[in-house]
Image (cartoon, helix red, strand yellow):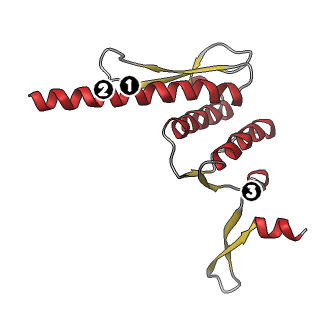
């Protein structure tokens, strides 16, 4: 029982620190992606971190505070990306994989997200699956899959730093 108590205390410490770091980063990133808006993370059961969940509260500019489920598709997508980036910043990693995270975004919000991605590029490698030309433009390398004439898929690649230096 003593060992279980010690492990529970250590888990609570780690969870508390991770939650606080992520919540702080979420507020900052949300404010950048939604200028004039506010977002925060709230524990569903702050008295017992071992069973608590996390709720995302978002107030895009000019709107009332809403739960994630009540936002529009684009707002929900951008809020989810803000949460993801907050985790990235709270607990950095050498690389991140993102799959079409910007698919539902309009041009203005895409630009804001690209600025955040550029910032992440300074300290980590990003692997981004995208169909957005603007997202591809910030890449160092592009990889694609294409269908050859004989019906077989082929992988193509291009380092953009080489292409850009030729001009």
Circle 1: element type = helix
Is residue 58 something one can see in this rendering? Answer: no
Residue under circle 3?
136
Q: Quadrant of the C terminus?
A: bottom right
Residue under circle 1?
16
Residue under circle 2?
12
For residue 149, side relative to residue 93 (left or right): right
Horizontal and vertical percent position of residue 154: 64, 78
Please say if the residues under marks 3 and 1 sit with CB atoms less than 8 Å apart: no
Horizontal and vertical percent position of residue 165: 84, 67
Horizontal and vertical percent position of residue 105: 72, 40
Residue in the picture at 63% in, 50% down = 100
Residue 27 vs residue 14, the one in the foreground:
14
Task: Give the class, few, some or many, for how many residues have Cα within 10 Å of label 1's Cα (few <14, many ≥20).
Answer: some
Residue 75 vs residue 128, the one in the foreground:
128
Is residue 46 something one can see in this rendering? Answer: yes
Which label's residue is closer to the chain start, 2 or 3? 2
Which label's residue is closer to the chain start, 3 or 1? 1
Residue in the picture at 69% in, 72% down = 157
Query: Which numbered mark, 2 or 3, is in the foreground of this view?
Result: 2
Q: CA distance from mark 3 to mark 1?
A: 37 Å
Quadrant of residue 117 in the image? top right
Whether 163 is drawn above or below 123: the answer is below
Please say if the residues under marks 2 and 1 sit with CB atoms less than 8 Å apart: yes
């Amino acid at each position: 029982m003593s060992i279980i108590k010690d492990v529970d205390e250590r888990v609570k410490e780690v969870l508390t620190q991770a939650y606080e770091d992520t919540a702080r980063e979420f507020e900052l990133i949300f404010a950048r992606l939604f200028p004039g808006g506010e977002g925060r993370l709230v524990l569903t059961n702050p008295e017992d971190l071992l069973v608590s969940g996390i709720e995302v509260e978002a107030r895009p500019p000019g709107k009332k505070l809403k739960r994630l489920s009540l936002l529009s598709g684009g707002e929900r997508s951008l809020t989810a990306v803000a949460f993801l980036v907050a985790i990235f910043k709270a607990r950095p990693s050498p690389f991140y994989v993102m799959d079409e995270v910007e698919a539902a975004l309009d041009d203005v919000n895409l630009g804001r997200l690209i600025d955040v991605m550029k910032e992440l590029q300074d300290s980590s490698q990003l692997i981004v699956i995208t169909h957005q030309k603007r997202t591809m433009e910030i890449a160092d390398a592009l990889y694609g899959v294409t269908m050859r004439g004989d019906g077989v898929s082929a992988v193509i690649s291009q380092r953009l730093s080489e292409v850009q230096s030729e001009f």
